[in-house]
Amino acid sequence: MSRRIVLLPGDGVGPEVTAAARLVLEEAARRHDVALAFEEHPFGGAAIDAAGDPFPDETRAACLQAEAVFLGAVGGPKWDGAPRRPEAGLLALREALGVFANLRPMRVLPGMETLGPLKPEIARGADILIVRELTGGAYFGRREEGRARARDEIVYAREEVERVARVAFEAARGRRGRVASVDKANVLATSRLWRAAASELHEREYPDVALEHVLVDAMAMKLVLAPASFDVILTENMFGDILSDEASVIAGSIGLSPSASLGGAVGLYEPIHGSAPDIAGQDKANPAGAILSAAMLARFSLGTEHMARDIEQAVEEAIASGARTADLGGTLGCRAFTQAVLERLG
Ligand SMILES: NC(=O)c1ccc[n+]([C@@H]2O[C@H](COP(=O)([O-])OP(=O)(O)OC[C@H]3O[C@@H](n4cnc5c(N)ncnc54)[C@H](O)[C@@H]3O)[C@@H](O)[C@H]2O)c1
Ligand SMILES: CC(C)[C@H](C(=O)O)[C@@H](O)C(=O)O
Ligand SMILES: [Mg+2]
């Protein structure tokens, strides 16, 4: 039976990188004898234009019935003044799927230390997994809009911290056994709860994992000072959003970074970048982050580890052989880079 995958191409470069991920997934599935059935649904600004809603009911129903959901990107200046923005649709999607744990890996590929802005000796060996809480915090607190005064509320419950911390500790056990939990416990009450809940869970169930607590401002500094010194980084929602963009460029470009959002009934996969309005529609986007998100989909939703590894290896080989989009100083377009990956699928 075919496995149902819902594609939400979205806005800006979203459709371009989604097409790339689909091509690679289709080809890898063919080679591994896995039957996939793709469906595309309107989402984000494109859905506002088509149906007046960034997350139409029919898209929601399709996502909830799928085996996995793949998202390109949403947003753009056209919809910045919309009563319900494309980004609000994205938050509603994450909430509807219940995906509270967002995995954002970043690895500096051996020999590729000069792709990013750091000195090669500093970037060398960096291999980080950011585990970002995705369905709580400031993104989901009560909001008061206002021209004179506005309010965003941050709320975390102990169980919300524990369930995502558990994901980080489990991931660390399969990696180098270390978790750095990020907070602002010197100021925020939610951060003091975060730190206590992570520490107590650690003591109770994960004493074999090394846990350190790092204040978010210091982490922003340490990430560029010594990225190779971190293994798993655990963060609340907004800190993880910010730190993952910072971490991504250490490897070369935000266009390289994939993500998987797990913990609910259906997994959600998306590159961490946005709709990149400045390069949209010009075949300039780097599709690697989207293609690597498709590999995570193969791993976590389809359970096809071999297929995931093949896709990851093909991307790494393509880059190592000199295939580069403009963000990495190369001349290939989104389609040509995708072709270079397709040619290297095992
Ligand atoms: N998951 C998502 O859908 C998502 C994520 C982030 C931002 N956004 C939205 O995207 C819109 C634009 O936001 P932004 O400009 O701050 O962030 P962005 O990530 O879209 O772009 C930031 C910079 O990175 C570059 N870039 C991004 N992706 C790239 C890729 N694949 N290849 C090469 N270069 C790439 C862009 O050209 C731009 O210079 C906003 O509406 C924002 O809300 C959506
Ligand atoms: C578009 C926005 C809501 C989103 C976020 O902040 O989570 C994006 O920046 C991301 O990193 O996926
Ligand atoms: Mg972001």
Image (cartoon, grey):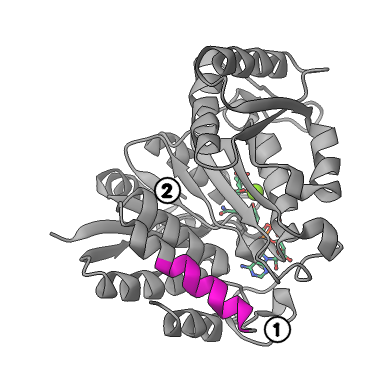
Query: Which of 173/287 is in front?
Result: 173
Query: Is residue 84 among what the camera can see?
Result: no
Residue at image mark 1: 330
What kind of secondary structure does the magenta stretch mostly adopt?
helix
Q: Give me the disc on residue 157.
A: none
CA neighbours of label 2 inside 10 A, class few (<14), some (14 to 19), many (20+): many
Residue 83 is drawn in which quadrant?
top right
Asked which secondary structure carries label 1, the reply is loop
Q: State which quarter of the image contains the C terminus.
A: bottom left
Q: CA distance from mark 2 to mark 1?
A: 30 Å
Q: Give me the disc on residue 268.
A: 2
**Which residue sits at x=65%, y=42%?**
231
Q: Is mark 2 within 8 Å of ligand 1?
A: no
Amino acid beneath label 1: Gly
Among all residues in the image, which is located at the extreme left?
A: 1
Q: State which quarter of the image contains the N terminus.
A: bottom left
Magenta residue check for 316: yes
Q: Residue 62: x and y, percent?
A: 28, 50
Which segment did they paint magenta? 310-321
Amino acid beneath label 2: Leu
Q: Is residue 246 left or right of residue 291?
A: right
Asked which secondary structure carries label 2, the reply is strand
Residue 29 is drawn in which quadrant?
bottom left
Q: Residue 332: x and y, percent?
A: 62, 86
Residue 304 is drawn in which quadrant?
bottom left
**Which residue sits at x=71%, y=53%?**
126
Ligand 1 resides in the quarter of the picture at bottom right
Disc 2 vs disc 1: which is toward the camera? 1
Q: Is residue 51 left or right of residue 141?
A: left
Magenta residue check for 189: no
Query: Which of 27/310 is in front?
Result: 310
